[in-house]
Image: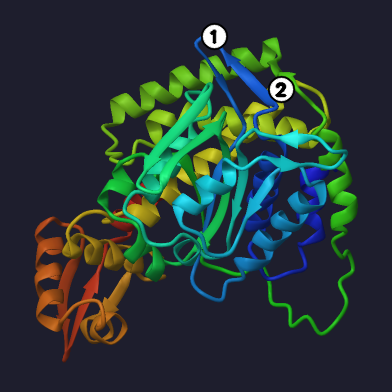
Amino acid sequence: MNWLDELVHQHSELESPVSFWRWSALAALSAVLKDSIYLDRAGLYRLYPNIYVMLHADSGLKKGPPVSMAKQLVKLVNNTTIISGRSSIQGIMQKMGTSQTMPGGTIKRQSTVFICSSELTSSIVEDKAALEILTDLYDRNYNIDDWESILKMGNIALNKPTVTMLTATNEAHAEEFFIKKDVQGGYIARTFIIYEKKRNKVNSLMYKMEHPPDYKKSAEYLKEIAKLHGEIIISEAGMKFYDEWYHEFVATVDNSGMNDSTGTLNRFGDSVLKVAILLALSDRPELTIEEIHLSRAVLLCEKLIGNMRKTTMGRGKSVFAQHKALLINELIERDNHSITRQMINKKFGLWATSNEWDEILRDLAVADILKIELQGTNTIVFMTDERARELKRHLDGK
């Protein structure tokens, strides 16, 4: 069992979804690596393993513990600045630009940071430019030397800025926080959205765990990883696998007419490679990516295409489009893909008025997405099984 699998196993008795632990661990590994490791992209640019991860689930689904785990691990390694709590984007940049004395007396002037928060919307002070700046800072491969921001309070110069981010949010907060430019302007395309609707299991925490986590032990491996520097190489078998997969993936996207206003699919190749780097280094502290790491990265990342669609469908569009997306998701998730008109008013009455829902239902019926029937005194809104399967496959990233 490698470092990542062991860490996930240590938390398997808890309620937080397994994927939250896995991706939080990958974020911690990314934060520790910073830009010490890179993958050469045919001499055109260097790809670094920094990632943005956003846990997306309803309130109460235990998003906080995995985020806390990642923060504790990175803190124990103590090789990068951690920003948690509430900050402005200007405050984050100022902290990134401040030299720090690291263990042993080394002065760290490189602008590396791990933004770690269990609630994205409360951690970054509202600023229209915040996500645009974070979008720009994500691309370490383009920020080769200095990155500068000229503000009223003065200039902020960052040396080789490298940002890893782990945040969490729920539908209500995301609805208010993300506007059209964030969804379609590149931030979402650069973010791994980990979407879950169900807890892993029920655990009252009345009894001790059989396999309790040992963060000090887990951090020891990260300390070894933090010592690595230089170029990571893909094996011949790995290069062949990735090349064949990439050509097939692009052909599928081009021929399917997939509508992706976020830009996620256009960046998907590099996203897979970033995850492959992290998976390889969670296996062993060696600078080689094997075919198995690329294969696992593809499987992990392809699941997230559906997550992106589920969390952004209707986002950045009209309010009615968002409400349509809400109802479509509801019908897909229901066992019989149906709901009464009365239940729509009861469950979603705060989202729109009864007259507005009537208009939404008419639009969706005309588009042949759902059907409306009168059964006795009840009005039933439903999808055919075929339509529900078709939409579910789309939202699952297929």
User: Can the viewer see residue 393 in this picture?
Assistant: no
In space, the residues marked 2 and 1 are separated at their CA atoms by 16 Å
Which of the numbered marks, if any, corresponds to residue 42?
A: 1
Q: Indicate the secondary structure of the residue bearing disc 1.
A: loop
**Position in image of residue 356 (x %, y %):** 12, 75
Residue drawn at point x = 36 percent, y = 39 percent: 186
**Position in image of residue 109 (x %, y %):** 66, 34
Tell me where residue 361 sits by quadrant: bottom left
Which residue is identified by label 2? Answer: 289
Residue drawn at point x = 23 percent, y = 84 percent: 345
Q: Is residue 368 above or below residue 229?
A: below
Q: Indicate the secondary structure of the residue bearing disc 2.
A: strand
Query: Disc 2 vs disc 1: which is toward the camera?
Result: 1
Task: Look at the image and tell me in which quarter the C terminus lies.
Answer: top left
User: Can the viewer see residue 242 in this picture?
Assistant: yes
Q: Is residue 95 above or below residue 147?
A: below
Amino acid type of the residue tagged 1 in the rendering: Ala
Amino acid type of the residue tagged 2 in the rendering: Ile
